Amino acid sequence: MRSGYKITLGVLTIMILVTITIGTSYSYYSISSEQQDPNKVATTCFNVSYTEGTSSINLPATYPMGEANANNLSPYTFTITNTCDTGSAINYVVTLNTLTDSMPTLPLNLLRYRLDQTAPSTINGTSDVLSNASTYDLGSALNDPSAQGVNTTYNLATGSLAPGESATYNLRLWIDESATTNVIGQTFTGRVLVYSYI
């Protein structure tokens, strides 16, 4: 029994010595190096301008109407421009936002909108009630000062602008013709925001 103990102890000692030798040899012969020059990342131009062509929509004494009559309403006109002369195309999202400090009392299933593109080509939008528009998740854009006070963001249009290109839109808002006298005294206040990304 005593000789078995000596053999086991001898084998363990040899295994420990081999492990120490391999570990020391690996660390001695392994090569390490470090970067000498800094990493550099250069971006291209990324700039979008937003220009209002008309003042805000203000309908203080409006009434329910059909789309034919809504065509006579003065639209809110704005232009989005990719001000870069080089680089890649910039994507954008046009949104209509409800605000936390003046929540709408007018039901959004009675507020109708139509967004028409007038430049670079004319594209007539289809009218719909705002409650049918998809909501847009602003994510980190909520930290932007222009997004302060935004409650819900409704996606009205998406597009892309090559360097130097512009897109002009007309937005019309009106009360749907199916509304009853229950909408008397109801209000809607909103803000158009355009978010751009690559």
Image: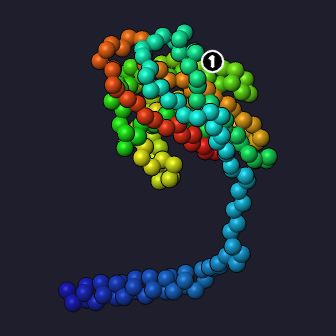
Residue type of the residue flagged with mark 1: Asn
Locate the N terminus and report the quarter of the image it occupies. Answer: bottom left
Residue at x 66%, y 40% (from the top left corner) = 51
Please tell me which residue lies in front, 75 or 130: 75
Name the residue carrying label 1.
124
| Residue 12 picture quarter | bottom left
Q: Residue furthest left?
A: 1
Side of 77 where 156 appears, left or right: left
Residue at x 73%, y 23% (from the top left corner) = 121
Residue 127 makes an appearance in the image: yes
Please count the marks in the image.
Answer: 1
Residue at x 40%, y 30% (from the top left corner) = 188
Please tell me which residue lies in front, 82 or 150: 150
Instruction: Where is residue 19? Give x, y as percent.
Output: 44, 82
Residue 160 makes an appearance in the image: no
Give the vertical position of 52 relative to 8 (above or below).
above
Q: Secondary structure at mark 1?
A: loop
